[in-house]
Amino acid sequence: MSLEDTLAGVPLFSQLSRRDLTRLAKATVTRAFRNGEVMVKEGEQAVAFYVISKGKAEVLKGGQTLATLGAGDFFGEMALLDGYLRSASVRAMEDSECLVLSRWDFLAELRGNPHIAVAMLPVLSRRLREADQRTAM
């Protein structure tokens, strides 16, 4: 599967054109993680977005497992926009590989191609609405 296809499978980027996906793919790097290695740590400055291309990882908050992620899953999407501190840790559950897009590279693409942000807004809005519904229960 191409980098563009992997990115197109991420809901955040699902409405982007092939050309825009190609531009973002060029800005990504591949990073390998060993079993047990912490990919991101709760409380750290959020500087990148990750898509798992191979392997499995667990999302941890306060030592408790919140979710298990596999190939095609992603985390750190809010880092692209706000750069706040990480709200949870993510640790590899087996040898894994991720596509990593830094906040700086992403913002550079947005500055040159603001229509990317316009295409992402409905997805972000839907995710916020879903989060609001989950907390209201």
Image (tube, rainbow, N blue to C red):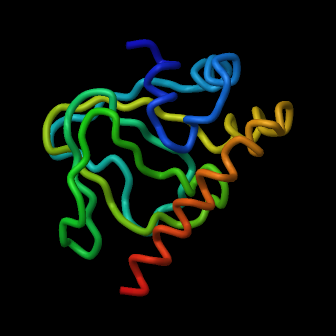
Kindly identify the residue that appears in the image at 57 percent across and 50 percent down: 47
Left or right of 107: which side holds 54?
Answer: left
User: Which picture quadrant has residue 120?
Assistant: top right
Q: Position of residue 9 (x, y in %)?
A: 44, 31
Q: Position of residue 66 (x, y in %)?
A: 24, 66
Residue at the top extreme, as displayed: 2
64 versus 72 height, above or below: below
Quarter of the image with the N terminus in it = top left
132 versus 85 height, above or below: below
Q: Position of residue 60 (x, y in %)?
A: 26, 64
Kindly identify the residue that appears in the image at 42 percent across and 24 percent down: 30
User: Which picture quadrant has residue 98?
Assistant: top left
Residue at the bottom extreme, as displayed: 136
How many callouts does the rendering have? 0
Kindly identify the residue that appears in the image at 56 percent across and 57 percent down: 78
* In-front residue for pair 98/45: 98
Left or right of 33: which side holds 29?
Answer: right
Quarter of the image with the C terminus in it = bottom left
Left or right of 51: which side holds 90?
Answer: left
Left or right of 15: which side holds 34?
Answer: left
* In-front residue for pair 15/88: 15
Q: Position of residue 4 (x, y in %)?
A: 52, 19
79 versus 50 height, above or below: below
Kindly identify the residue that appears in the image at 24 percent across and 39 percent down: 70
* In-front residue for pair 135/36: 135
